[in-house]
Amino acid sequence: MKTDPKALLTKDEGELHNLILDFISLWKDSNHASSYTHSMVKSVKSWLAHNGIRITRPIKIGGSQASGVPSRNKRDSGGMNFLTSSRIEESRAETEHSMRIAEEETKESC
């Protein structure tokens, strides 16, 4: 999707809206994270606003932070917290087991 930035400034809001929607579809098909797509669209809209063009039509990006769906990082970090807490519990159980064995060996040797 090659577009000259100067050419964007000559398009009306409807054309720009459709172009942004096409961009979103293209990036979704390329498996880009929706949060990354959201930041790209935000940058383009900001650049257009800087040049006096405002996009007032709603643009929805499925799975974006705005929709309430957690980003990839938030989903992954939740899993990591679970794994970390599981490993801590396993380590604690192993330590308690080792301490019991050591106590029993100490009692037997006395």
Image (cartoon, rainbow, N blue to C red):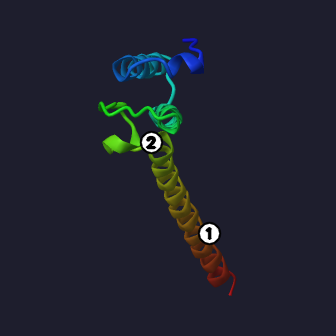
Q: Amino acid at mark 2?
A: Ser
State the separation of the CA atoms marked 1 and 2. Answer: 41 Å
SS label for mark 1: helix
Q: Position of residue 72 (x, y in %)?
A: 48, 40
Q: Are marks 1 and 2 in contact (CB under 8 Å)?
A: no
Q: Choose mark 1 or mark 2, whichever is in front.
A: 2
Give the vertical position of 83 relative to 43 (above or below).
Answer: below
List the residue tagged with mark 1. 98
Q: Position of residue 71 (x, y in %)?
A: 44, 42
Q: Nearer the viewer, residue 93 or 77?
A: 77
Q: Would residue 84 be visible to someone looking at this image?
A: yes
Which comes sooner in the sequence, label 1 or label 2?
2
List the residue tagged with mark 2. 71
Q: Position of residue 60 (x, y in %)?
A: 33, 31
User: The N terminus is located in which quarter?
Assistant: top right
Other residues around mark 2 within 10 Å, as few (<14) / some (14–19) / many (≥20): some
Q: Nearer the viewer, residue 66 or 70?
A: 66
* Residue at 52%, 34% in the rendered image: 51
* Residue at 45%, 51% in the rendered image: 78
